[in-house]
Structure formats: structure tokens, C-alpha cells
Image (cartoon, grey):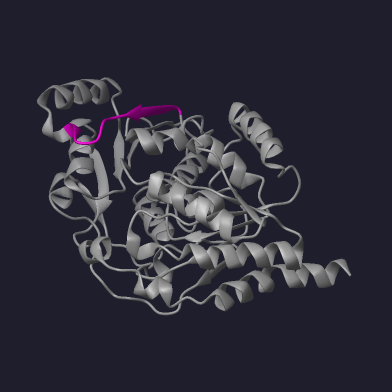
Amino acid sequence: MSSTDSPRILIVRLSALGDAILTLPLLCALREKYPQAHITWLAEPVAAQILAGHPCLDQLLTVKKGWLKRPSEIVSLRRQLQAAKFDLTFDVQGLTKSAAAAWLSGAKRRITFARGQARELAPNLATELVTPRHPHVVHRYLELATAVDIYSPAIEFRLPIDEPARADVAAIRRDLDRTRNFAVLNPGAGWFSKTWMPQRFAEVARHLQSQYQLPSVVTWGNEQEADWAEEIAQMSRGAAIAAPKLSLPQLKELYRGANLFVGCDTGPLHLAAAVETPCIALFGVTPTELCRPLGPHQQVVQAYYQPLTSRQRARAGNEAMRAISTSMVLDAIDSLFQPQSREAA
């Protein structure tokens, strides 16, 4: 490195909101070891919305999805990265597109995973390969930092408060009559195989209202999910209300203010967990040891694990999620709230 105390570091984690959030502990660990470092993150626009303003980042660069197929964007990115004179890169994604960005930077040290965790051309374009030992992705990402002698760091996310988004959310909560305690239900997911049924979310909302006087807000990200949110609200008998369309910074601040998040294995779940909101995480086609929310107030519900390849999971039905009964989720909720009730008594 040009300086052992102030290296210039590039993190490459381009896409997938949830994966970007789960990479934040690596960023925080690098900042803790190198307070004087210049740390840059290269991301695609969706993830960049959450990374913007992070206190451990000096610079956030964005690149459009599919940039590697457009020569003009390759040239532009290469020029931008090489001007920064990075000493080392961490390719957390481990794919050709992320490895190519790290390689284009010109950094002498390019760190990624060994083949298996890293795929395609990624291992060939790196200078150092790390073989992960831990099953959970957060710990795997942190294992990359062993290349710079960081071992077993604290797991921190440090997502800052977005004051404009918080003000927007305060106004929205007033409009929704959710100015006090409330829960968030999030029925959507990136794949249908990860979704649970709207009727059961409505049953959860009724339980939260009747047992804990906790009304719910249903969040969504696309038109299909918006329909599910309205359906849940209608079937909840007044216990839940659909949120309006929210930006990612607004979702972050809504989740930060919630007493509970109930949702499927998807980006919003990891966003809620990262701002330390207690979560009930519903898992079907994903092994829980891979990416369950970490922390003492997080509960995972899984009826059984449906072992499929990534491509199969993207196309599968939601049988494993349908096997999660409403009572299983209510039991998980009660295990979170009832000890608190007994202590209060």
C-alpha cells in the first residue's frame, strides 16, 4: 500500500439491496482499523440510495446496470477509478462484472473469494483469494478483511438518520394515524418463492392489534405488492393500512421508528434489521444460517428448507412459505413481546 495508515480502498458491491446492507459491517470494520483511510464504494443506483451519507464512506460511485456491455461506460469508469489511485479493492460480489471493476481500478491488491464463493471470471481477476469458513454472509464478507489482518470485528451497520426522509415519514405517519407505536408488514420479495400469503399477513395484523394494541403499516415496492398491501389492509378489519409509495430512505426511517417488522427474506427485512428494529423473518427457499437477521431481538420462522439452486429458487413456487402457518408466526411474535409484558408488570 502507499500508506499503511491511510490506504485508498475500493469496495465493489454493485447490486441487490439486501446484499449491500449485509456488506456494511465490512465497511465499518475497515473504517475502524483505518480511521485515516479513503474508502470508496462502487454500487448500482438502487443500493446507492441506502449507502449515500454513510459516515464510514468518503466517496460513493455509481454505475448503471449492464455497464460492462457498453464500451463507453467501461472507458468512463476506468478513467474515474484509476484517477482515484486505489491501493486495494474488495470485490464482495465475486462476479465478472464486479471483478472487472476492481481490475479496471488498477489497484495492486485485489481481494475476493476463492472459487465457489466467487464465480465466473472473478477469481482470475483478483490477486488474493479468501476461502470463507462461516455459513452466514455477513461473517463471510468480514472474512475478506482477514487479508488486512482484521479478525472477528464487531458487527455494525451504522446506517445514519436521513433527516429529510425522517421528516417526510413523520408527516406520512400523521396522515396514516400511526404517530405512536406500530408494526410494519412487508409481503413482497424479489422472488415469488419467498412470498407468504396476504390473508395470513392480515391475520398477523389482527393479532398485533388485539393482543398488543399495535396497528400495522403495510409497505410495498411494486404494483403487485401494492395490490397485496391493499388486500391485507382490507382483510385486517382495520388493524392494518397500506403505506403510500415510499423511497428507500423513507422506508429506512419508517422501519427505524417501528416496534416490529414482519416480512419475507428480502432487502427490506435486512434494512429493518440494520436499523435495529425487531424482526420476524419468514424463510422458505433460503437456508436460515445463510442470511438470517443477526441480533438478540430477531426471530426466524421456517417450516422447512426447500433446497434449490439460485436459478430454481427464482422460478419456484412458494410451497415452503405456504407451509409456514399463521400460528407459527404468532408464536414468534409472542416470544418477543410477552417477556417484555411480564417485565413491565
Left or right for 253, reference 153:
right
Q: Is residue 9 visible in the rendered structure shown here? A: no
Left or right for 321, reference 338:
left
Residue that appears at 74% across and 66% down: 210
In this rendered view, identify the residue nearer to me: 214 or 290: 214
Residue that appears at 41% across and 26% down: 59
Seen from this angle, which residue lies furthest right?
Answer: 345
- Find residue 128 and report its horizontal and vertical position in percent: 23, 50
Residue that appears at 46% across and 65% down: 197
Note whether 86 is above or below 210 in the view shown.
above
Q: Quadrant of residue 131?
A: bottom left
Note whether 341 is above or below 171 in the view shown.
below
In this rendered view, identify the residue nearer to me: 333 or 31: 333
Left or right for 229, reference 146:
right
Q: Is residue 90 visible in the rendered structure shown here? A: yes
Quarter of the rendering occupied by the C terminus:
bottom right
Which range is magenta? 58-67
